[in-house]
Image (cartoon, rainbow, N blue to C red):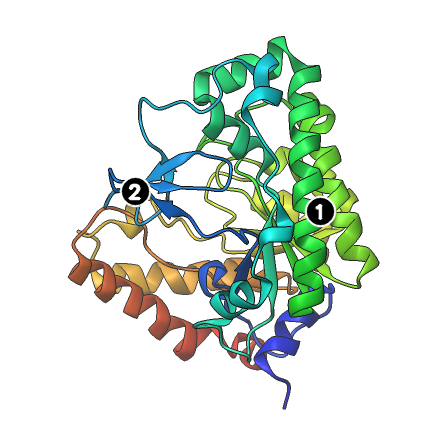
Amino acid sequence: MITEKENFLRLLRGEMPEFIPRYNMMTWNFHGRPFPPVKTPEGYDKDEFGMLRTTTEESMGGGFPVPGIVLLEDITKWRDVIKMPDLSTVDWDAFAKRQYEGKDPNNPKSVMIGDFFVTLINWMSFTEGLIALQEEPEECYALLEYLCDYYCEVLKKCIYLFKPEILHLVDDVAADQMPFISLETYRTLIKPHHKRLADIALDNDMLITMHCCGKCDSFIDDWAEMGVTGWEPAQAGNDFAAIKKKYGPKMVIMGGWDNTGPISMPETSDDELREALIKYVDEFAPGGGFAYGARVATSMSKEDAEHKNAICEEIYFSYARDWYKHH
């Protein structure tokens, strides 16, 4: 019988899986961050570049820059502020041990790296980062190229340490209803660095997936050109019908569930949720190119969230997983 891992890798290779696999970004990935954050006296996490991070209950554990503290105020001064971390000082054995903690060997090994747009925005603040991309594109490119040099070395080391099957590029270049940047800006300033990482992965026989939230289907042709064969979380609002028609199983939709929409609200009844989950599977499963990724992400109590997500799990095992055997 085919393993969970091989079934998913088969999916990413554009082949028909034996069963519909699930996708879970948070438990599969080896993070490309060899330097653990340092805790400041104020309780913030300081990363290897000097940026301070915090989190809130509303962000569901996701980190973001401490409000009011900007690491890079002037893009033309980035050489004075942003310094490449010294990878020769990394305890790679300790790094590898941290990365393997909690990992299930039955899942694919995936290295998550490549957040160029998000990093620029985090360093400069959202408004100033967008202005810099428009007013100083050469400086932005130079900074991101410098960052990419670092990411490339980290990726190569991760390949040596973990022998990963997947490179998981991660860069949120879109909002809920439209991209943050134009396709031209992406192609000129961001894509070349994604492609450098993708080329390393392809040279090492790895598959490539992309994490991008929001309305980002306008970038999919460029991702496919780089070798990307899977995209998550594929949030509602993208033209999934057009994507499936054009790419079929060659661009796996890892998700596609409306995890922040009305059906994921706490007041939705259990029966309504189950009905919507079945409709979701019936829409995305035909022809392959689909990994089940239904979870709720709206604001609700921990108990409500656990209950709703338990229903998502129930429908996966009772209906979605063996869909191809019955249809």
Residue 55 badge:
2
Q: Amino acid at mark 2?
A: Thr
Specify the quadrant that holds the C terminus. bottom right
Residue on which the image places disc 1: 152
**Is 3 drawn above or below residue 225 in the view shown?**
below
Q: In this rendering, would 253 be left or right of 127?
A: right
Q: Secondary structure at mark 2?
A: loop
Residue lying at 47% horizontally and 66% vertically, measured from the top left: 98
- Residue 183 visible at all: no
Q: Label 2 neighbourhood size at 10 Å, few (<14), some (14-19), many (20+)?
A: some
Specify the quadrant that holds the N terminus. bottom right
Q: In this rendering, would 55 be left or right of 245?
A: left
Q: In this rendering, would 68 be left or right of 143?
A: left
Q: Position of residue 80 (x, y in %)?
A: 58, 20
Residue 106 badge:
none
Furthest-top residue in this view = 135
Residue placed most toward the observer, 117 or 324: 117
